[in-house]
Image: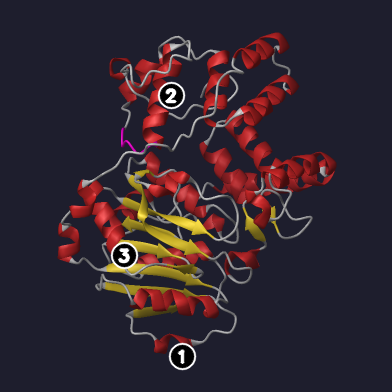
Amino acid sequence: MPKHATGFAACYIAPEELTPELEDKAYETLQAKLTDAGFRLCNRGTLISSTKEDVAKVLSLPPISLKDEYVFIRKYWGTAWAMYAFLLRILSFHNWFKESSAFFATKHIKKVNLFADPVNYPLYESFDSKLITEQPLIAVIIPTLNRYQYLKDVLHDLEKQHYKNFEVIVVDQSDNFDEKFYQQFSLRIQLIRQQEKKLWTARNNAIKHTKAALLLFFDDDSRVEPDWITEHVKCIDFFNAEISAGVSLAVTGQKISDSYNYFRWATQFDSGNAMVKRSVFATTGLFDEQFNGMRMGDAEFGYRAYNHGFNSISNHKAPRVHLKVKEGGLREMGSWDGFRPTKWFAPKPVPSVLYLLKKYFSQSFYKNAVLLGIMLSNVSYKQKRSSNMLMLSVVLTVIKSPLLYMQYRRSLHIAKQMLHNNYQPELLNE
């Protein structure tokens, strides 16, 4: 982790790979130039990877300067976030003179669009996928909870799929279970009735219930096009990947990123739209069931898969429209997202968020992620796309700070218990 204001991603290129076209001369240190070039390439869709030797070579160079950290923030996030970093460091008792000098010395840096000019893969369109020709069995896994109204459209979309060799495993946790509901669909449905309302247990039960080579995770409040399954299979075959991470186009919440328009290394695992080779679960284990009733179980699995070296491609060719309906599903578990519980005095963030951050990341990253998440969580979910409302959220953080601190302490207590449990996910038998 860098020692200064922000965080360069660990996506490096070696010194000998730094061409004039890749070099940004606004940086004064070679390590910053190399890291910036790697960061830019990865985010624009170049599927580069860094060996341990590459990383060690870059990190052995003279460290990134404080000025270069501010260049990086201004370049990719803009002046407002540079100001945030500056104020945060001043309040953290860093050297005021050094911080001010670095901050004002970079005021000429203009924000760029990190996702402009993405890499194209022209051979993808004409690619004749042998995997599609072989037609391996695919299991579409859908946990559902009190959402028959929306599940009906989900299953109708699956009826229209061009790829035909798939089964649908529905794990129904609904209060008013209706077995007859499923008889109206022309699909191979394996229905599992689960009394407990446990999302991650449901997904694990479905995984263990099938012998399919490819597992496609889906949500019960989503819509997809007829080529959805085909594009997931094609992506895995074309890129020789273990995971095809389909993009999710939410109808509410934050603005949809431009990075959702092209292939790139996936930076998240969304269990509402992702195809995973069965062998991945045999190596990494199933989903962590400590996340039942909470959030980010998919993020924890995605990070585990990343640590095991599996390739995950962000697949814009297999999108889903995520309706994010107000009732049913995780909404009944008491939260809109990881930082927005539905009740005033509930733990905040959801304890599983702190569990994830403490389990995998540095203390510095943990503190910054929690602070930023809480600061931006004090307006409704629908208002996340408005910069003015997010600024209001920051103001409300100060006003509500006693309540927020109490909520945080409650969440931290539960997260520490989760860590103490030392849960080990079950390995799947292939």
Looking at the image, which is closer to me, 128 or 388?
388
Distance between mark 1 and mark 3 Cα atoms: 26 Å
Q: Earlier in the sequence, mark 1 or mark 3?
A: 1
SS state under label 1: helix
The image quadrant that residue 97 belongs to is: top right
Label annotation for residue 36:
2
Residue 41 image offset from top left, x and y in percent: 36, 31
Q: Amino acid at mark 3?
A: Ile
Q: Which residue is mark 1?
A: 180
What kind of residue is marked 1?
Lys
Q: Image quarter for residue 382?
A: bottom right
User: Is residue 71 in view from this perspective?
Assistant: yes
The one nearer the camera, 204 or 67, is: 67
Can you tell which quarter of the image residue 396 is in?
top right
Q: Is residue 161 left or right of residue 90?
A: left
Q: Main secondary structure of the magenta part?
A: loop
Magenta span covers which residues? 44-48
Residue beneath the point at 48% across and 10% down: 28
Mark 2 or mark 1: whose residue is earlier in sequence: 2
